[in-house]
Image (tube, rainbow, N blue to C red):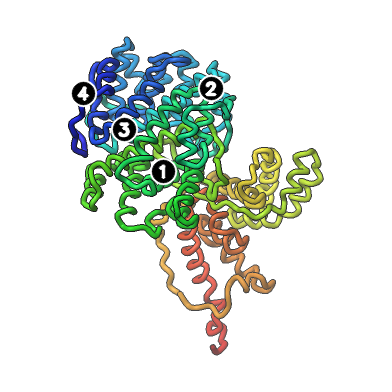
Amino acid sequence: MSYLRAAEVSSPFPPFAAFREHFGFVPKIYLAQTLLPRLIEAEAALVEAVLLTHRALSPIQKECILLVVAAANGNVYGVTGHYQMLRLMGMAEQQLDRLLAGHRQAGLPAADAGLLDFALKLASQGASISQADVATARAQGQSDESILEAILVTAWANFLCTLSTGLGVAPDFEPREIRHQPPDWCAESESSEAGFGPYLGIVDNAPGSDWAALQEEFGFVPSLFRAQTPRLDVVEAEVGVLEALLFTGDLTRVRKERILLVVSAANCNTYGVAVHGQILTTLGTQPDETDQIALDHQRARLPEEDKALLEMVRRLATEPHAFGRSDIEGLLERGFSQTQVLEAVAMASFTTFLNTVQFGLGVKPDFTPRQIYRPAPQKKAHLSPPELRPTQREFAADPDAEAIAKVRRGDLDEFEVLVLRHSKRVYRTLVGILGNADEARDAMQETFLKAFQHLDSFEGRARFSTWLVSIASNTGLQLLRGRRILDSLDDDEHEPDGFRPRQIRAWTEDPEQFYSRAETRSLVEGAVLKLPAKYRVVVMLRDMEQLSAEETAAALGLGIPAVKSRLLRGRLMLREALAPHFDRSAKGVAP
């Protein structure tokens, strides 16, 4: 069973012969792609390099990674297939059931259990992977070579999960029930801070036979491939997939690059957005349009059929449990051919593969990112895909750069200068969040202490002031959550909260102008402090601290649409509260 029709392939077809030799049968996931024999050949080469070539990891270790990642993704096709493979390799069914219930219960060696921890986090929350995760794997006895292999196998597991979902492939054996529970670290992912590496000690300038092909197609050799030079066989296979899928085919190159862009953004992969945004620019797309496609393709200036194509791959990447035949049929009804739809599904799947490899290696973008993508804070332990959190990058020089450099060189007096320079903004932000002056003063001390302790981690992707407000916001929000009012901060913006504006009278003057006047400042501050917390903090940062929507989104860990929605609702609440004071007719003054 598959959403797309099958086609005849030449017999004997070498990839199918290889699959029969290794697996004993041809998996349905490849039979479902017979419209593109060249793609099956390229995937078979990647299977050979990643799964069947054994160096640091054993076949059982690789299959265990594939199994637990498929279970974490809720992918029945993968769980069923890899469960069967591990049984054929001699693993007892009882141990396999424990592995599915939670790999820490399976009685695996500590190093193997730690490797599965790393793989699970990389597979489901790749944007949160950091140098610390790699350091932990090393401390548990893993070499850089074994970590690299684990990254590649995890990426392949994500590829198979996405591809099997997009194609609607039925399991090759009797389906297995999935009882896997998310590991404990998911609950702590909110506090993780990931950046760029590289995380492994890999030489990134070794010659490769495929560099010329990449140079010709991209105009440069992406650092993602250079970072894999210890496994040039894998790089060669990856380039083979690109040649079969991206560089040729029925879908245009621009459409495929848009898929790479949208799926990378959906996966919170800044590297992929930066690279493919730049490539789209060289192909004739304006940078602002590229930014809009990454942020919200539905609002981009694209034909409706192109928006439908991008919406399909976005849903496939971020909502696999809700994805189904109707998503595929929707594209077919819009005039896309079966081959084009297959290319789109495969392109989205391979984008997830590349994103996962990049997350694991920590490869720095080849171009300055126009947007930074971070995973959404999670309200509870689960493995749902992260919501897009784009943050517009600032290109203007940071006025605090010189002082920061001096502090890093040991001049502690310069940090006092930074404290004096930003204390008012930090204090006002915390008062706005907490609504209590004493708590705000305590939180301000904690904010500057955190900033000093973590100054080495400040990478300059935003202004220091924005980074500082972000720390202050997180500190304040943590205190609010400690008061058990989490729901008031994190409610879905689409859910009604009972507020409906009753007085929408025009103010005779701009409220921001009033705020600047001493005689009305306390009045406005008092009204702001009475707003519900989730609206109060956005109004404070946007209207009173004059942060941009992008800076506010970065500081609060929200999406820009959520910031705009909360700001509008907060302003309406504030307008209604202050209308009697600012309306001249209310004071007996004739208009």
Q: Nearer the viewer, residue 100 or 260?
A: 260
- Whole-angstrom CA distance, mark 3 to mark 4, is 27 Å
- Whole-angstrom CA distance, mark 1 to mark 3, is 17 Å
N-terminal label among 1 and 2 = 2
N-terminal label among 3 and 4 = 3
Report which residue position mark 3 lands on: 39
Report which residue position mark 4 lands on: 174
Please name which of the two marks, 1 or 3, marks the residue nearer to the observer. 3
Q: Are marks 1 and 3 in contact (CB under 8 Å)?
A: no
Q: Residues within 10 Å of mark 1 (few under 14, many from 20)?
A: many
N-terminal label among 1 and 3 = 3
The residue depicted at 39 percent of the width and 35 percent of the height is: 242
Q: Are marks 4 and 1 in contact (CB under 8 Å)?
A: no
The residue depicted at 29 percent of the width and 38 percent of the height is: 166
Report which residue position mark 2 lands on: 137
> Given the image, on which type of amino acid does mark 2 rest?
Ala
Q: Is any part of residue 84 visible from this angle?
A: no
> Given the image, on which type of amino acid does mark 4 rest?
Glu
Please name which of the two marks, 3 or 4, marks the residue nearer to the observer. 3
Image-based side of 9 in relation to 83, left or right: left
When asked about the image quadrant of residue 235, the answer is top left
The residue depicted at 49 percent of the width and 38 percent of the height is: 215
N-terminal label among 2 and 4 = 2
Please name which of the two marks, 4 or 1, marks the residue nearer to the observer. 1
The image shows residue 115 at horizontal and vertical percentages of 47, 21
How many numbered marks does the figure carry? 4
Report which residue position mark 1 lands on: 260
Q: Is residue 424 above or below residue 327?
A: below
- Whole-angstrom CA distance, mark 2 to mark 4, is 35 Å
